[in-house]
Image (cartoon, grey):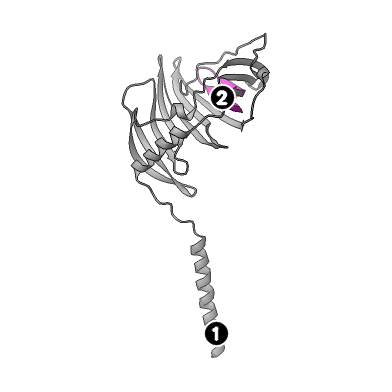
Amino acid sequence: MHCSRRIERLRKLFVATALSGVLLGAAPQPVQLDSQLVVSRYLTALARVSSPPFVVFSYRVSQAGARNIEQIHRIFRARRRERDETVSMEGDRAKIVRVLPVSDRYAIARVAPRTSAYTFLFLEAKRRGKHLDYVYATEPLMASAFTVTQVTIDGDNYLPSFIAFRSVAASVRATGTISYTKVGRYWLPIAATASAQLLGHPTREQITWSGYSFPSSLPPSTFIQPKTLSVPAISPPTVPP
């Protein structure tokens, strides 16, 4: 009898211990913040964001429609100068070098909407990993050739992880998206898509960035233009101007 009671007490103790372990191991639900507080933190994070003084990376651009393009570029960027090496075109190796002033069209500080130019309407909070992301519709206060229509704010860094946009350039109207993530100390693009009617044809473009590195410097010879310059025929990009 005493043995049966002891076994029953041990069984209950085991169940209670196991249940306690499950509860302790369960990931806590992230707390949803007030939508205006999120926007305030977002604006503060944007004010502090910086671009790397020196950066090297690759990007692939694919376009199908009015023109079919498949290219891989290697970029060396130092403050105000950029070396753009086209290393592949339509699957074939290439060696085309262009040295140009920096024009980082995808810098988050340049693309991200702000309350000075947009109204923000909170749509939803979505769990991603251990935190929430906050989704807002954005409406411009003034008409513009490039307009952000939606922004998803990362609830960990309070910077945009996803931006949806529409753009108008001459007769081309496009819609698309840009995705960002943290790379080292910086907030950088990793993917972009756009769809448009170009020369009467539905056209879709995709860009992916990879291989980011942040050297402490780049030699001056990086930005000397080779004597022979052959510039590939590239249609105007539909992702943002």
Measuring 40% from the left and 42% from the top, which residue is drawn there? 134
Asked which secondary structure carries label 1, the reply is helix
Q: Is residue 124 above or below residue 172?
A: below
Q: Nearer the viewer, residue 115 or 5?
A: 115
Badge 1: few (under 14), some or many (20 or more) residues near its Cα, within 10 Å? Answer: few
Closer mark to the observer between disc 1 and disc 2? 1
Q: Is residue 42 above or below residue 144?
A: below
Classify residue 199 as left or right of residue 123: right
Judge whether residue 112 is colored magenta. Answer: no
Labelled disc at residue 127 = none
**Comes first in the chain, label 1 or label 2:** 1
Residue denoted by label 2: 61
- Percent position of residue 194, x then y: 47, 26
Q: Which residue is farthest top?
A: 227
Quarter of the figure with the N terminus = bottom right
Q: Is residue 127 above or below residue 185?
A: below
Magenta-tinted stretch: 53-75
Residue denoted by label 1: 6
Q: Nearer the viewer, residue 186 or 154?
A: 186
Q: How many numbered discs, if any?
A: 2
Classify residue 227 as left or right of residue 151: right
Q: Pointer 1 and pointer 2: residues touching (CB < 8 Å)?
A: no
Measuring 52% from the left and 20% from the top, which residue is drawn there? 103
Q: Amino acid at mark 2?
A: Val
Q: Amino acid at mark 1?
A: Arg
